Amino acid sequence: MPALSHDARRNLVGYLFISPWLVGFLVFVAGPFVRSIYLSFTRYNIVTAPKWVGLANYRMLLTQDDLFWKSAWVTVKYAAISVPLAIVIGVALALLLNSNVRGIAAFRTVFYLPSIVPVVATSAIFIWILNPTIGLVNQVLGVFHIHGPAWLKSSPWAFYGLVFMALWGVGGSMVIYLAGLKDIPNYLYEAATIDGANPLRKLRHVTLPMMTPVIFFNLVMGIIGAFQTFTQAYVITPDGGPESCTYFYSLYLYNRAWKYLDMGYASAMAWVLFLVIVVLTAAVFRTQSRWVHYGG
Amino acid sequence: MSLQILKRWAMWVFAIGLTLVVFATGSSTPRKYPQRKLVRFWHRWQGDWEKQVQKIVDAFNESQSEYEVVAVSVPGGGADAKFILGVIGGDPPDLMSMGSTPVANMAANGFLTPLDSLMTPDEKTRFFRDSYPGIRNIGVFHGRCYGITIGADLMALYVNVKQLREAGLDPDHFPKTLEELEDWGIKLNQYDKQGNLTRLGFLLSDIGYVSHYFGGGFNVLPDGRLELNTPQNLRALKAIVDYRRKIGFDNVVRFQAGLNDIEGAASWAFMHGDLSITYDGQWRVEELRKFAPDLEYRVYPIPPPAEGGTPLGGLVGGNYMIVPVSGKQKAGAWEFLKFWTGLDNPDRAATFYNMGGWLPYSPAVANSPTFQRWLAHDKQFQAFLDILASPNCKAPPAIANLQFLNDLITRAEDDAEHGSVTPEQALANLDAKYREEARKRRELGYDE
Amino acid sequence: MTNEGVAKLSQAQKLGIYLALALLSIPALLPLLWMVSTSFKTNSQIFASGGFSFKALVPSPLIGSNYPDALHNMPFLLYLRNTLLLCICTIVGAVVSSSIVAYGFAKLRFAGSKALFGIMIATMALPGQVTMIPVFSLFRSLGWYGTYLPLIVPAFTGSAYYIFLLTQFFKTIPGEMSEAASLDGATEWSIFSRLILPLSKPALATCALFQFIGTWNDFLGPLLYVNDPAKYPLGYGLQQFVSHYGGFYAQLMAASTIFTVPVIILFFFAQKTFIQGIATTGGK
């Protein structure tokens, strides 16, 4: 009985390893995805059976819906600003929290805290901090004789308030960066020291390059997450904010789906978003070879 | 080194404790009357109000021996989704309290049981004859009644007596016109040294409501057309915008942001004296009695404008009690609902309404001895009853896409207030956008 | 034991670091401080007009009644038990399955692996709201509505997020080690379990932490699939304090604090495990 060829065996082993995900995908994910694509070509108000309308949803979305463009723009702006900021701050924080000083564990906990506090509490706090008259931010600005804006109640400051809020969640990515930092093998630093490198050069030539795999991860996840931002907007400005400046795409999608019961249209919106994210992410993946440095 | 050992011990203790807790306690909610027919009731009241609802459920269960109502409170966040999924999932509860949003839509598509089909002819007559007009018309879609509201809401003015007297105004001779009220408001405003508002006298807002005082409103006419961009609505919007401009829009926004009050909690700015005259719902009466019994106040309906206004106008909002078409125990659901509304026993039901400070469904309940006794120490509630009884008290338009319209209205008001568009433009946009949406829906095959 | 990548610091440097950390900690701590301080106030105290300032962070008078009230208002131990049950199951499921799959994608070469990886990443790009109904229908037809199964079983099929994360970590492990091992006749499975896994403790622990927090805070899943109040987890219980129809803010903060403290403790003590550097062994 001929043994499996080397290639066939390799494929078999590979598929065996990924089988948990593959099975899950086929059973729980693929079906709903396909159904959702189908729904995007129908008029579907959830309570009755869907009715085929072809490209009508997409056509209306792209040519007759100014709220679509508005919410898309809000979301793109948000992603463009918050993702790079989060990475820079996250990495900087991780580097700082990697310091070998006593009590660093307590500090790490402190910075991770905002990610653990329930959204309810965090939202209330932000509404307080950004309060125009008695909030912390405007009080601090007042010290410099700057008349702070009415943040969450005015445009475009509500938007920046939400960006500000996004940075609060940086603790999560910080933990990943820390794990990545600890993974950097010692001998690289030793070699650099032998070469006479100072700390800044070590940072540039050892630390950062070795961190690129996790930075890459957070970049991709950051993009995917930012484009789908929903919870903060929903909790703090469920009506889309002053002059709709915080009317995020996902919030509009939610309204279309569950408030107006226009699920077919919402599905079309979701798939447009999907395409955009996939294209962007694929582009980022393509740049991998240029800057991501895997040890293996 | 000992810290290490300590930590390890701590982890073990934690792990063992964990395991114990996990496997220690029991499982399902037991039923009190397992031999009776089960009526499942989902609602959205939380905290204190949930307890009140439970009392009502208990009272019902004790009053008869055929059904047992089991109430489940579904918290706010995903409640809409859960309710909807419950209905389409084929295993809905027998009675649900739902916000007004999807009801018309569901009714239009045959997902709700017309409640009048559950009533006996006698009950039907009595219900439609006895109920307040505003309440009777809520939940009516294409002539059938699909929802009855237990928690109906109305708004009126709450007036801080002390602050009025301090400003030289007489709380017993309240303004009869809106213009006079605005003047009072300006007299009551207080500012700090930098010119920021520290106390707000009166502010007109919420065009969906206010438009009714101008003889307008976003109503459905008998021929099915929707009134949106009418001269009356325009007047209302202009009044809202102009008033804000007088005080300074930015000033108003900052002040309101500083109020930070959360619905339902003992946090209402009126209680703290930040608002002299404010516009709020009838449930506040009970709250004031509980949390600020020393605050002297009055309730007055909003005075209409001097010209062309409608007195005692109002828009009734609230929860609808609906019975899904695929529910299993509709008879039981109706019995419970009937019990709660007070159709058969207004006096007993009065207690229920009083618990939450809710509006009664009929004058019979309002005039019952129990209700009158409660009214004696919540005198201010009478104003709400007056509004409820007035013919100008309306129900929201019964259209399937109501939520979309509401969002458009909010945005129009917001844009006009910010000054990015004039009131005329705001309403014109509103009208255009709504018609556009309606056209799109027709094209897609929704039949409204 | 110390990672030499972290240089030995001078006194001045240490001082500088402490200063920076202390300053930055203030905004990070604010949410928690506000939450805890509110939990010790009465409801009317919280919103005393104009009352938001640093002074307001210190409750006076300090009342402790919110905590017993909050605990009284919900069957805390029951919810805790339910949550822990869910957490344990989902953590085990997620970590085990995700690491296995990640190894496949990271270290093994097989036909279509790139395409499948891409598909996996793409599955995260579709907003969950539009698949909620088909997924719900799916679980209903499987008969899992009303049970914990919809919340637990998917964890055992790996989550794209963790798989992606672990793939990145596995890829940083040099290939020479695995090659050496397979030359010695080891199967892929034993390379995976005996070599790669032990080297990846930090990453695995990170996934476990995230899954714990995810399940601990999860509210929407139980909301949709659980109908019996005896089966509610803590996240659901917490939501009941949030109200549109009458709630108690101070108790909400007390409940939130009770809700958050175990996670904080867990994170603090477990830090060592996942931020721990890997012991340097030969060849690395």
Image (cartoon, grey):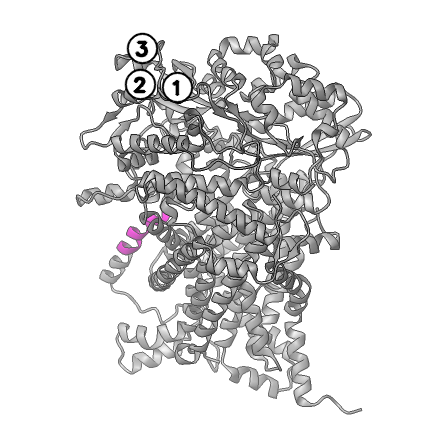
Specify whether residue A118 is in view: no
Chain under label 1? Answer: B
Chain assignment, label 3? B
Along the viewing direction, whichever of B3 and B171 lies nearer the viewer = B171
| Residue B73 against residue C16 in the figure, above or below | above
Q: From the image, tell me which residue sits under label 1.
A: B303
Query: Which label's residue is closer to the chain start, 1 or 2?
Result: 2
Residue A151, given in percent of the width and then of the height, sits at 31, 44
Q: Are marks 3 and 1 on the same chain?
A: yes
Chain to which the residue tagged by mark 2 belongs: B
The image position of residue B94, as x and y in percent, is 72, 35
Q: Position of residue C140 (x, y in %)?
A: 72, 52
What is the secondary structure assignment of the residue under circle 2?
helix
Task: State the residue at coordinates (58%, 49%).
Answer: B442
Asked which quadrant contains residue B66, the reply is top right
> Magenta residues?
C19-29
Q: CA distance from mark 1 to mark 2?
A: 9 Å
Q: Is residue B45 above or below residue B364?
A: below
Marks 3/1 in contact by CB < 8 Å: the verdict is: no
**N-term mark: 3 or 2:** 3
> Which image quadrant for residue C183?
bottom right
Instruction: Please check the rendered image and state whether residue A292 is part of the magenta-colored stretch, yes or no.
Output: no
**What's the magenta bit mostly, secondary-structure-wise?**
helix
Q: Are marks 1 and 2 on the same chain?
A: yes
Left or right, A268 with reference to B336: left
Mark 2 lies on residue: B180
Between C86 and C248, the one nearer to me in the picture: C248
A19 with respect to B291 (left or right): right
Q: Residue at x 59, y 51 (%)?
A: B15
What residue does disc 3 label? Answer: B170
Q: Are marks 1 and 2 in contact (CB under 8 Å)?
A: yes
C142 displayed left or right of A17 = right
